[in-house]
Image (cartoon, helix red, strand yellow):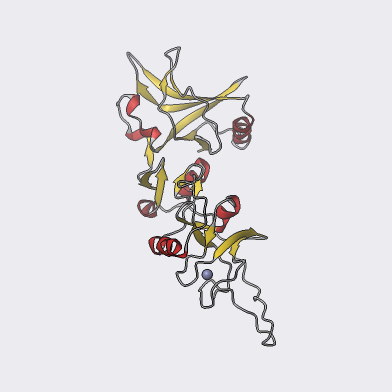
Amino acid sequence: MRTDLMAEAMCWDLSLNVTADYACANTEFSYFCSHSVCLQEVRPKKIVNAHFFAPGMHVPGCPNEPEKSDGDGTAQKPAKRVSIVAPPAVPTELGPAKSRKGKVRKPTKAELLALSDALEGKPPSCAGTLIEVVNAWRAMPKDQRPEKQLSINDEKFTYESAFYCLSEFGESPIEKLPCATKVIHGLARVDDDETCYWIKSVKTFRADNCKLNLIIRISKDNGMTDKYMKDLLANSLGVTSFTLFYSGDVPKLSGSGKSYGISKDISNDYQRFVVLPN
Ligand SMILES: [Zn+2]
């Protein structure tokens, strides 16, 4: 029996253990109690803190069964459970969660039992935006980074191996920059122009007869990224040095030949870049 809120469950659609916070944001998926004695369907709910509840009740004896209050012995009501504010989950995947299997039917007991066995002891998985992943990386003690999993585009890394500092890159051609598979980061400057923001790496990269910066142009036409940059600069008055984090297409030589840039619009629902003041 538990006296606190049920914060983790199995997600049938993703075949992963997930947190209640994740499930509250993804209510289209099916969730189940992961204890092999129970395997009841559970649903996410958020009043103060996100948690799971079992509309059909947990099987008696399931460790997730809520503790009953001491009543008169007849109609027992669940006891008031302790509401614990969980720290933000450390993302185990960069990007939006995908329904990998497109499961549509309800699983059988045997399938749930197999999934429960496969997931036993595994920490909850959750997808995070780049800013959530970067924040988790910064908050994590360095010696823990090699132990924490992080997938990028289905490739498995740790919080140590998934991050690549531009200063390690040396003189290699920019095509070798591992930004399509990892999160690259390095010192940068930010310029506020009339129609756009320019994020310019301090590190320069080899070109034909010169060395060029990596420059990301953020158009002020895009409401979401424009607000992000506006807030960043408003909160960093007087700051001249920033750190750029980027994950996405490899930069290409611009039309003018004066910089390496990212031609594609890099704003999307989980953002390909993060800029932090130093
Ligand atoms: Zn249960």
- Residue 94: where, in percent of width, then height? 46, 43
Q: Is residue 85 visible?
A: no
- Residue 235: where, in percent of width, then height? 62, 37
Q: Nearer the viewer, residue 120 or 94?
A: 120
Residue at image location 43% in from the left, 61% down from the top: 111
Q: Nearer the viewer, residue 56 or 104?
A: 104
- Residue 143: where, in percent of width, then height? 36, 54
Quick one: which residue is furthest to the bottom in this view? Answer: 72
Q: In the figure, 199 relative to 62: above or below?
A: above
Dividing the image into 4 quarters, which one contains the N terminus?
bottom right
Q: In the displayed structure, does residue 89 sit left or right of residue 252?
A: right
- Residue 226: where, in percent of width, then height? 62, 30
Q: Quadrant of residue 53?
A: bottom right
Q: Quadrant of residue 223?
A: top right
Residue at image location 41% in from the left, 21% down from the top: 252
Q: Is residue 229 visible?
A: yes
Q: Nearer the viewer, residue 133 or 231?
A: 133
Q: In the displayed structure, does residue 125 sit left or right of residue 54?
A: left
Residue at image location 45% in from the left, 69% down from the top: 36
Q: Nearer the viewer, residue 267 or 113?
A: 113
